[in-house]
Amino acid sequence: MVHSATLWSILLVATCSLLAVVESREVVCYYGSWAAGRTGYATFTPDDINPSLCTQLNYAFLDIESNGTLKNGFNTNTIAKFNDLKKKNPALKTLAAVGGWNAGKSFKTVAANAQLRTTFAKNAVAFLQKYRFDGMDIDWEYPAQADMANFVLFLKELANAFAPYKYLLTVAVPGPETATSVAYDARAISSIVSFINLMTYDMQGDFGVARHHAALYPGSAAVDDTYFKRQLNAEACVKFWINKGAQASKLTLGVPFYGRSYKLANPKMDGVGVPVTGPAAARPYTAEAGTMAYHEMCTSVGYKRQYDSVQGAAIVSGNGEWVSYDSVQSITQKCNLISQYGLGGGMVWAIDLDDITGACGPKFVLLTALNNCVNVNTSGATTTTAKPGAATTVKAVTSAPGTFVCTRDGYFRDPSNCGKYYRCLSGYKYEFNCPSGLYFSEANTACDYPANVKC
């Protein structure tokens, strides 16, 4: 039995290596289309987006109707400008995000009816074709236990309709176990969609004390004193989804570009777990109590900045308020987690909440930080499933013998090393190596046995 198990393990590893497709990791960017209607410096239109900082750009949100149609009312001019960003970055994929926090009832109705599922899939394809999107992101907030099977059927219907056009299909889901265990079939969803965007934020709970809303790790025993609380952090969410059958390479880790703010019961006490009386006052641009965009926070005066090294989260406090948020430091730590678990990349909500004008330093400081760190540890890494819609491989030219030069986006084998290859993306070159003994196949954009590769 020992020898049989060992042989099986070897065969399994070999098979996975054979099928391995190497990708640089994704940076999934949500754009809140209502940001175009904000006032002052916070106005943020598609013209303000830097398309080179995202691999997927999600237009949020379109509404689903209970009859299986997409609700009219979206701004066609804004959508046209949004998709024109692909002229600046041809490797960019744009997706229409459907749903959000007000669409749960319509999703439930459509998902439960076979005819409505078909109707929606047809309407979705027509919409993507008409407005030049590359796919759709489904953001159902939130299915109940009774919807689990119907949600899978709904996604299958969409995936089948999208397949002839190679459209991407992604989903946004809550991260914590308590919010997902009874309503999401992680294994089935993972087998259908291109990516699963984990909403690993808004996890602070309502406990009457100051808590991080997007902590990387659990807090001390005094802070996280129950099993429920110990699941309210990014690492616990990632572990849960993987243990439930989701492919790690399809998971993207959510990173918020906003903070959750509290009103302190005692302004002299500002640590994690101190009593609070409720959410802090709404700010002028986000206009929601308990919420501060990064650009609102970094321009505020009279605040003390701290870093919680235990939970991997940043804090500002002052004027009787306490705010938990993600900083460049915490984002860098989250990139380490992405690498550690072999995730597909990072996801941000939302690009319009970053330092969009450079008022506090470099423009788009948080999104740039994610780009700078998310691919740091990808060299030699592999994933075990191909991603739909991968860039087409095109032969590149060289400037000198043995020197590879990117001339367009795609995947290319090194001119002098069959086991080395590159991904060219937006003018940048990322280097990878196949597992030992395998060659990179440009035809299949995968590492394969030498006998199957013309090199």
Image (cartoon, rainbow, N blue to C red):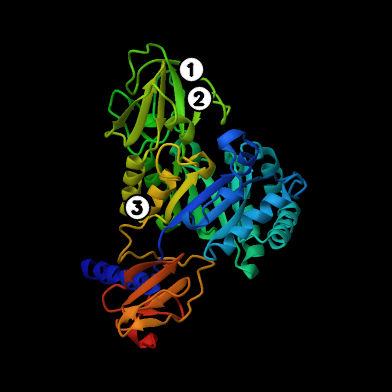
Q: Earlier in the sequence, mark 2 or mark 3?
A: 2
Res. 282 image quadrant = top right
Q: CA distance from mark 2 to mark 3?
A: 29 Å
Q: Amino acid at mark 3?
A: Cys
Q: Residue placed farthest to the left in the image? A: 2
Q: CA distance from mark 1 to mark 3?
A: 35 Å
Q: Amino acid at mark 2?
A: Gly
Say which mark, if any, is on residue 290. Answer: 2
Using the image as rendered, state which of residue 298 and residue 124 is in the foreground.
298
- Percent of width and height locating residue 105: 68, 38
- Percent of width and height locating residue 58: 57, 51
Q: Residues within 10 Å of mark 3 (few under 14, many from 20)?
A: some
Q: CA distance from mark 1 to mark 2?
A: 8 Å
Residue wearing tag 3: 373
Circles 1 and 2: CB atoms closer than 8 Å: yes
- Residue drawn at the location 49% of the way across and 20% of the way down: 280
Query: Can you say which quadrant of the picture contains the N terminus?
Result: bottom left
- Residue drawn at the location 67% of the way across and 44% of the way down: 107
Q: Does residue 220 lie above or below 233 as drawn?
A: above
Left or right side of 430 for 119: right
- Residue drawn at the location 67% of the way across and 63% of the way down: 161
Left or right side of 420 for 161: right
| SS label for mark 2 | loop
Say which mark, if any, is on residue 278. Answer: 1
| SS label for mark 3 | helix
- Percent of width and height locating residue 37: 65, 38
The answer, for residue 331, to whether it is visible in the render is yes
Q: Does residue 253 lie above or below 89 as drawn?
A: above
| SS label for mark 1 | strand
Q: Amino acid at mark 1?
A: Gly
Q: Earlier in the sequence, mark 1 or mark 2?
A: 1
